[in-house]
Image (cartoon, helix red, strand yellow):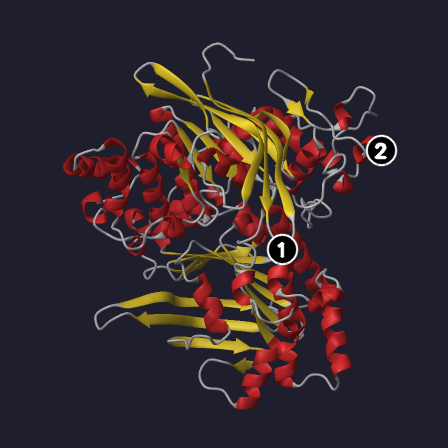
């Protein structure tokens, strides 16, 4: 599958995670395969509770205490030194090794709410410098200079003044910029953005996303976006993975997902997206609600909400059907014995309109 | 026809200042006028810090307005009120808040949360009637009567927001102020809540003052929109007028910031940024200019000719 010139950075195979509490076991992740190549952007979309954040927290080794990794591997390739590649299985690393070599240094993460991810008792500059000093032993002065540069890079005016300020003195958008600066401080190779703009309003959201895009272009790092906003995905992603109930149900390039979706859940997600051009008075919603992951799921997890569900969906879980080199979907509708079912007419006309617009 | 209707809510020259210290006063809302007719939805949009929530809170009398007048149903509600008037207001005007977990008392059952207003205003004659009223309202917002026995933490985010709506609806209000009531929810659940609010409006004829920063959702629910920036209403009009022909550069930047779910065009689209100081726009110098229909924009004469020409 490896194409020429594309270096694989992250490879997840059959990842399965459960959360154990006093009265129940929740199978949050039920076998996730995921690939990420150098310099590319992957977006993971799904409803809340579909397991998108848990998957990435596993890669960072910051799962909650009651989480158990049942199975799977997360292979991460990084430059140990100049021109020396090293591949590790992040699951097998101990917490200590993880903290020393991976977290912050090679994989950095940006969280949803900038107020809770910043330390209110530390000045902004100190928080940016902390990682560099800890990981690389950068001298104080050099770290300070670098922190100034980073603040400039993330678009904060007057960095000399801001570097001494505390998080509560900054606005929401500014705080998120600081969080990005902290994430970039140690030159990571992989940046994970967990809903980086949900807590911000639209104008600032657009600016933060353009900032992440610019940084990615300039530094050539790989980015994973976790989001439920398909508008953002359209803007940033090269590849999209659609997640439902702890599984990836469809994956492909952004064009394949938006213009040729195959899974009924993806159809629903795309139809539910508010569109400024349509004039229907009601918004489309996917009927029902996601299944509880406490009980073992038999067959296709999406079947109860799927008006196109086949009989087999109740018994057997669909495998990943290959549509093209990059496009896969887990639905029995793709099987050659399945009846021909087209996507809803409304969605079809919408896609046609989008294609026309882009010409 | 629009001129014939008597407005339910009339806000005239509302100013809300907050004194920070002796030398500095924060002008959160600086002279805002708008009207809201019975049974319609007015959307207030703007970025954080533009004063949209402050307006909502002034209207529901959580703040004492610095200046200006607010009329609700023909009654002046700015300033001190009599006990009777206050009571009437508290049943007829209700609020839905942003974070459903933070605004529901975690130690109370849904039944008691929803019925609290009924308790205070003695709106039932027996326990059975109270129970019935709560059950009715829960069904109306798409929950089951059994949910009355549960606590807020036993619900998902969308369901909790439904409880918040039920609590507002149980008083049969004429006006509901929805302050960012969907921004904390998932996109698919946002759509459910917006649909629910629309259905309820059709059924009960409640008016909404819908406060949000996300224009794409506001478009679905509002008949008219007011765009707010730095405490000034910079542009008002019907949803169509605003979306088809945005005149003020701030409205244009807000519209351009909405991500479009089309990867081919979205990849290369740059959003417009807007800074009123850089653009040299002084809101205090501008006056409301009529652009046709109900479309107004706040600007000076020169600015108007500049914006409309381009």
Q: Position of residue A232 (x, y in %)?
A: 51, 37
| Position of A53 relative to B276 (above/below) | above
| Position of B98 relative to A100 (above/below) | below
Q: Place residue A357 in its image quadrant.
A: top right
Distance from disc 1 to disc 2, alpha carbons, whole Å, reads: 30 Å
The number of numbered badges drawn on the structure is 2
Q: Nearer the viewer, residue B212 or A32?
A: A32
Q: Identify the residue position indicated by label 1 in the image.
A: B156
Q: Position of residue A104 (x, y in %)?
A: 35, 35
Image position of A223 (left or right of A164): right
Q: Identify the residue position indicated by label 2 in the image.
A: A311
Q: Residue at x 44, y 30 (%)?
A: A93
Q: Place residue A222 in its image quadrant.
A: top left
Image position of B28 (left or right of A48): left
Q: Dot 1: what SS?
A: loop
Q: Residue at x 65, y 42 (%)?
A: A272
Q: Position of residue A32 (x, y in %)?
A: 60, 30
């Amino acid at each position: 599958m490896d194409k020429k010139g594309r270096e694989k950075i992250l490879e997840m195979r059959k990842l399965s995670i459960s959360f154990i509490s006093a009265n129940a076991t929740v199978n949050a992740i039920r076998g996730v395969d995921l690939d990420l190549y150098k310099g590319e952007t992957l977006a993971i979309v799904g409803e809340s509770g579909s397991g998108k954040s848990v998957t990435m927290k596993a890669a960072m080794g910051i799962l909650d205490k009651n989480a158990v990794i049942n199975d799977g591997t997360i292979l991460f390739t990084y430059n140990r030194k100049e021109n020396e590649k090293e591949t590790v299985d992040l699951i097998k690393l101990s917490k200590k090794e993880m903290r020393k070599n991976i977290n912050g240094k090679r994989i950095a993460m940006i969280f949803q709410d900038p107020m809770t991810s910043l330390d209110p008792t530390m000045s902004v500059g100190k928080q940016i410098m902390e990682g560099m000093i800890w990981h690389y032993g950068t001298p104080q002065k050099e770290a300070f200079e670098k922190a100034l540069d980073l603040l400039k890079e993330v678009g904060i005016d007057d960095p000399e003044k801001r570097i001494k300020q505390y998080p509560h003195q900054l606005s929401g958008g500014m705080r998120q910029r600081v969080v990005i600066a902290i994430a970039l401080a140690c030159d990571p190779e992989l940046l994970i953005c967990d809903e980086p703009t949900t807590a911000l309003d639209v104008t600032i959201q657009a600016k933060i996303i353009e900032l992440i895009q610019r940084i990615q272009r300039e530094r050539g790092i790989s980015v994973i976006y976790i989001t439920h906003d398909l508008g953002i995905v359209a803007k940033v992603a090269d590849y999209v993975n659609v997640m439902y109930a702890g599984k990836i149900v469809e994956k492909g390039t952004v064009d394949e997902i938006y213009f040729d979706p195959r899974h009924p859940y993806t159809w629903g997600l795309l139809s539910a997206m508010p569109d400024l051009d349509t004039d229907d008075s009601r918004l489309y919603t996917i009927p029902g609600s996601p299944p509880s992951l406490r009980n073992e799921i038999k067959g296709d997890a999406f079947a109860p909400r799927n008006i196109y569900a086949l009989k087999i969906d109740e018994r057997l879980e669909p495998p990943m059907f290959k549509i093209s080199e990059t496009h896969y979907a887990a639905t029995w509708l793709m099987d050659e014995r399945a009846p021909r079912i087209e996507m809803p007419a409304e969605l079809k006309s919408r896609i046609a309109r989008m294609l026309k617009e882009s010409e | 026809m629009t001129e014939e209707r008597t407005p339910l809510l009339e806000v005239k020259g509302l100013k809300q200042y907050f004194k920070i210290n002796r030398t500095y006063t924060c002008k959160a809302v600086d002279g805002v006028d708008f009207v809201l007719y019975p049974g319609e939805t007015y959307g207030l949009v703007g970025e954080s810090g533009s004063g949209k929530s402050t307006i909502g809170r002034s209207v529901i009398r959580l703040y004492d307005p610095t200046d200006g007048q607010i009329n609700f149903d023909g009654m002046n509600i700015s300033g001190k009120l009599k006990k009777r008037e206050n009571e009437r207001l508290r049943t007829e005007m209700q609020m839905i808040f942003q974070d459903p977990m933070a605004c529901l008392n975690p130690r109370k059952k849904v039944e008691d949360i929803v019925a609290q207003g009924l308790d205070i205003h003695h709106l039932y004659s027996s326990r059975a009637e109270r129970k019935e009223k709560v059950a009715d309202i829960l069904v109306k917002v798409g929950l089951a009567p059994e949910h009355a026995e549960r606590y807020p933490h036993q619900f998902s985010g969308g369901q909790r927001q439904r409880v918040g709506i039920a609590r507002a609806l149980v008083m049969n209000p004429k006006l509901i102020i929805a302050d960012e009531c969907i921004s904390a929810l998932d996109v698919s659940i946002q759509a459910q809540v917006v649909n629910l609010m629309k259905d309820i409006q059709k059924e009960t004829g409640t008016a909404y003052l819908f406060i949000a920063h996300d224009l794409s959702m506001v478009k679905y629910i509002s008949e008219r929109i007011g765009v707010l920036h730095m405490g000034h209403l910079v542009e008002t009009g019907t949803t169509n007028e605003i979306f088809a022909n945005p005149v003020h550069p701030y409205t244009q930047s807000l519209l351009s910031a909405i991500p479009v779910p089309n990867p081919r065009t979205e990849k290369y689209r740059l959003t417009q940024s807007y800074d009123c100081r850089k653009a040299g726009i002084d809101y205090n110098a501008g006056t409301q200019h009529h652009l046709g229909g109900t479309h107004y924009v706040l600007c000076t004469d020169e600015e108007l000719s500049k914006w409309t020409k381009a």
